[in-house]
Each structure stands twice: as structure tokens, then as C-alpha cells.
Image (tube, rainbow, N blue to C red):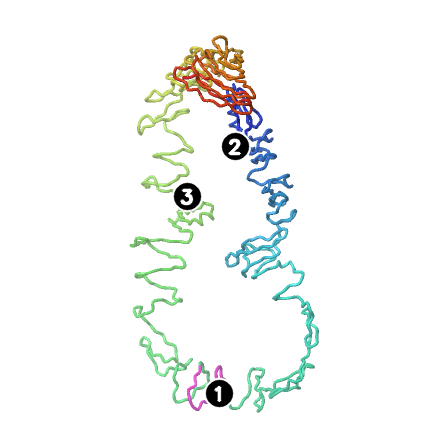
Amino acid sequence: MAYIINKSDGTAFTTLEDATINTASSLTLVGRNYIGYGEIQNENFLFLLENFANTAAPSTPIAGQLWFDTGSNALKAYDGTKWVEVGAATISATAPEDPPAGAFWFKSGSNSLYTWNGTSWSFIGPESAEGFGTTRARSSTLVSDTGTTYPVILITVSDVVVAIVSSNAFTIASSNSITGFGTVESGINLNSSMFISGSIKGNADTATALENTRTINGVGFNGTRDITISANTSNNLEAGDYITGNDFNGGSTTVWSVDATSANQIGKVVARNSTGGFAAGLITADLAGNVTGNVTATQGTSKFNRIEANEFVGQNLSGNAFSATKLRRAVNINGVSFDGQADITVTASARTLTSDSLASNVIYSELERVGLLSSLEVNGLVTISSNMTVAASGNNSNITANKILKLTADDGASTSVVDLISPATSVSAGYGAKGAIIPTVDQALDLGKSARKWDNVHANTFNGDLVGNADTATSATTATNIAGGALGSLVYQTASGTTSLLPVGAAGQVLVSTGSTIQWQAGGSGVGGSQFVWSTITSDSGFTVANVSNDNLSILGGTGISTSISGDTLTVSNDANIFSSITTDSGTKSAAGVTDNLSIRGGWGITTAVSGSDVIVTRSVDTYVLTTAGGTTNADLTTGNFNHLKISISGDTILNITQLYEGLYHGIIFNTDASNPHTFTLQVGGSEVGSITMLAQGSSPTGIQPNLTAADTVGFIISASDSPDTFWVKAFPLG
């Protein structure tokens, strides 16, 4: 029975006959009972999975098919006439040919994006001038010198910013400076090397020249040069009191002077002389500032910051005198009289001192004992003539030095000096990044002595030679000797806490373990150079381990299997002719033994043959032809290899089939009269199993599926017609 293959929209794509294939599309369609369909169907699935990935498009595409173009790494769809890229823009220097509406094109020369509107390419962006740098207005941000970020529009021509548009005024930070710009004002800011050509409306902060020359008092002025003008007035400027000179009318230069003098003259303005003074009679005023000369105050109180005079005369004088020749009354200082007219010497007990500090000129002392000091600062050496003991009662006592704390022991003949150095001092001296306690001379001091040992020394790393026993060790860089050893001796642990030496073995011996100790033993083949041994051999069903020094392993074959060794190669061969699994349309057969046999047999109308490695199944088609004009007609299929029955009828007919071979697939072909309908009744063994009405040409036959009992061996069903006047009734085995 042929397959009718339909598309997704319901339209027929092709009719696929039995045992045939169809290559009208990019996939190979397989008809029923086609031998070798498995490989074809698997390849179809793979082609769909990879979307027919290839540099060349599929040769027989259909609308809606996908193809992955490995040449451009792009997925494309077939629209019925051409291949169109899916979900990506075409990248090229020239526009794609015959694009679909809505397609994108990324022009590689200018890095611009276009879309096809059905008739032409529409530009999307970004703006650019092909062959030049960035040429467009773009949004950006600038950071000010105060750290604030502002939004701006940068107008750029061939990578040069010619203008900045901003809604804020600020100074651009040096971290994102732009050539030609320093301070940004609100509005449009032009690069300092650029100019505006043309008319401008609005007020300019500055201008090089006025567009139209203006006159000032009749003198032309456009701002490009200085001008001199005369006053345009009908009234003169006249000199008033204390002014000498002519009246001024603006026509010529006129000099006026102030009528002033430093002398004491009536009617003159007072002016200072060359020393800053002036002469005057009586001045009545409140004075402020320095006064030199006689001052007479008849009443009130006069206040002065400082008065200097050769002599003060008056009944009473209060306040402090800047200096005095003699105290009005002599006083005693530690019992010594003092009136200020002569020097005196005063002796005093330290217990009578009340100040908390000594004068800076006190630099020597014979003190034998100092009491409790809260702090002591010394700018120089502190020399102690006898033993020194420093005892601190606090819980956090410190001795601090700047960069280096030096401890020196001097016996008169030689000295031992230890430095505690800071990390910075260690780095500058080339000793490393950490501070350290070091001798001032390399290898001049010992840390401990044989009679004065440290109990425990803890450190992350010991560098240098180590004398004595180490509790543990990761590795030994060098070793001078192991006591009791000889050339070639091996060190090993004989018991817990006990180490022993094993002398070198004889030539050709190998080191083996006895289970409780180690010893030298004569080696097998290969000893003396390198020893070739195997330890464990593993297979699918088990493993074995060598248990003696010269153990042997045998690899044997079995039924149909042989083994051989050539050089370093072990070969396992299969000598038997076997099959593993045979698969058919209706079942699978696996070999039950190493030498199992499989028989492929034919049946009614079917023969089998083996040719080389191929099994050939042949179906013999034998058709029983019957022609009837009506009435009851018998078809005897008991003889021959009949598996088809072809009947031509021209009247109402009853067909009685004597026997159909059970188990075969039968087809009964009816060729009807092209003009008149007829009734066809089908009987098996004399019993009616269904009736069919044969209609006129161009119509489909009608009928019922036979209602058979369990005792019947075959059933019948009507098939679709191959042509208007031919249809099939198919017989199939029951059960």
C-alpha cells in the first residue's frame, strides 16, 4: 500500500510506493518494506539535527527548510525561492542582493546598520563618515574637578570634539580632559581652536568687533581700536573752593590743583610735609593714634597705650613703670636686702625651691641619688661606673630605640655586639623584609654554649648546618656522615626508635622484603641493568599477582580463540565463524552459543538465497486473473502460488473464493465498468463476508468491512482507489 506524504499545510507532497525511496527533497523518504531503511532514517535524523550543515546549500530544498551555512557560520531559511539568513544581520561592505523585507545589513566599511523596507535600504545608525574617524553627536558623561559626574553631548568630527553641550557649568577634571576645553558653561561650548562663521542671535559674553560701527560723540567705534572723544556739553566744569585752575569745558586738557600747604596758614587745606607732619595752631578733637608733642587736657580722662618721657612731674603717679633706678622700699631676698641699686648674691637650700623645672643653663650636677622620675629624656650618653640593674614593676615594659637597639659587652680586650634591627633597616641593609636580632660581625657570636644550652628553640625554618638530632625532618640538603655507615649503605628503621644501616649488596642482587625486614637477594632475568617484572595482571573476569621473583603467567585461548606472542605484542585471535544478533522487521534473534546457526527460510511465494555476505529475499508475484460479466463466479486458489487475484467485472457479481493461503498478504484487484455501477459480493467458503457497490468512473467505491467470526482465517478491507475505475480489496491473516 502506497504512502501519501502530506506537508504541514495538508497539501500532498508525494505518493511513496512500497519498497521504494523518494529523493524529491533534502531528506530521503522510505516506503514500506524497503530493505536497508535504517541507515537512511538515521542519516535523515542527523541531517535535521545539524540543519544540513555544509558550505553548499541543499540541492532540493522546500519552503521553510533550515540550512546552516558553514562558510559564513549563519543559519538560513528557504522562503520558496531563495535562502535568507535567520536572526542576524548580513555583514559585508556591499549591500546584499534581493533581501526580504525587514532584513538587516551591517556595512563593514562604516560599521553602520541598515534595514530593507521592501524597496530600498534605510539607514539606522550610528552616524558616521566613511573613511574618517567618529563623526556624530553622541551622549556621554564628564567628571568635574570636584568629582561630580555631568551628562553632556559631544559633537565630534573625525575623532575631534568640536563642541560640548551641557546643562551645567563646571571645570573638567584632568582625568577625562578633552583637548580645547577647560571650563564648560551651560549651553553650547565651542573648542578653543574652532570658530563660528555666520550670524548669531543673542548676547555674546565677549566679541572681537562690532558688526556695525557706532559713533561716540561723533567718533566712529567698532571695538577693534581705542578712540579719544571730547565732552559734548554746553556747561563748563568750574573750579570751586580750595581748587586752583581754569574751568573745564571738555575741549582741551585742564589741570586742577588742591590749594593746600603743610604750614600753619589760614584758609589752606592741610597737607603733610616730606616727613609726614604738618604745622597747626590749636587742634580741638578726640585724638586716636600716636601723638608727639605737648598735650594739655583741662578735664576728662586721657588714655594712652604707651607714654615715653624724659621726666614725669606730678603729685601722684599710678601704674607700672617701664624701668626704675631704685625701689621705693628695699626688700629682703633670702635675708639679703635688695633695693635695685646694686647686685646681690643669694644662697638657697634645694628644699626651698618651688619651681618644677631647672633652667636650661643648669648642665652640671653632683647628685648621688634621684627620686621617683615620671620620665627621663637624655640627649647623649648615660655612663654608669658600676653594675647596672633596670627593674620594671609594670606588666608592659618596653625598651625602644630608633631603627637599631644595640647591646654591647666589653671586657677590655674585645667586645660582643648584638643588634636588634627594624624591618626598614633590614631591607636597606639587604637582609630581607623582616626585623632581626643579628651580630654586628658575621659569625662573631654563638647562640648558647655547650655548657649553657637553650632548652627549646622554635622556628618555622632553620637555615645552615644543624649539629645534633632532629626530631623530624622534611629533607636534608647536605649530610656530613652517618655514624657506622660505609659506601653504598642504606639507612632503615629496624624498630620503633631504632635506626640501622644495611651494607651495599653484591653485584646483580635486588632489595627484597621478607615481611619483617629487608635484605639483598639474587635477582632474576634482567638483574644488573634494569629489572623487568610484572606485579598484577587483570582481566575481565579476575586478576593474578606475581608471588615469586621469577613468576610465570600463561595466557591460553579457548574454543575458537587462539593466542600468540610476537616481540612485545600479545595477539588474541577469534578463529570461529559466529553471528551476534540478527534483526528483522518483526523480531530479533541472538546467537545462543559460540557456533549457533541461523536459518533464513522463505514461504508461500517467497524464496531466499545467500550470495557472498548478502541474504537475498525474493517475492514471487503470481496473479490469478478472472473475468466475469455477472452472476456467481468461483476462484480456486488451492493450486499455484497465487497471492494476487485480478477480476474484471461488467455486471453484478458474487465471487466465491475456494481458499486463500493462510498467512499471506493478498490483494484483489477489481477493474470495474467505467460507466455503470455494479454490486460485488465477496464469499469465502460459500459464506458472505461483505458486499461492495462499484460506482461509476470518477467516484469512490463504497462497502463495509467484513464481519468475520473467530473461526475465519482471513479478513478483508477496502483500500483507496488507485484510479477512478480501480480499487483494492486486501486480505490479511487473522489471529
Magenta range is 286-304
Residue 298 shown in magenta: yes
The answer to whether residue 529 of the structure is visible from this angle is no
Q: Which mark is residue 444?
A: 3
Q: For residue 261, what is the image quadrant? A: bottom right
Give the secondary structure at mark 1. Answer: loop
| Frontmost residue, 661 versus 170 | 661
| Percent position of residue 85, x then y | 58, 37
| Percent position of residue 524, x then y | 42, 15
Cα separation between marks 1 and 2: 120 Å
Residue type at the position of mark 3: Ala
Give the secondary structure at mark 2. Answer: loop
- N-term-proximal mark, 1 vs 3: 1
Against 16, residue 414 (above or below) is below
Q: Tell me if 556 is positioned left or right of 198 in this view.
A: left
Residue type at the position of mark 1: Ala
- N-term-proximal mark, 3 vs 2: 2
Cα separation between marks 1 and 3: 91 Å
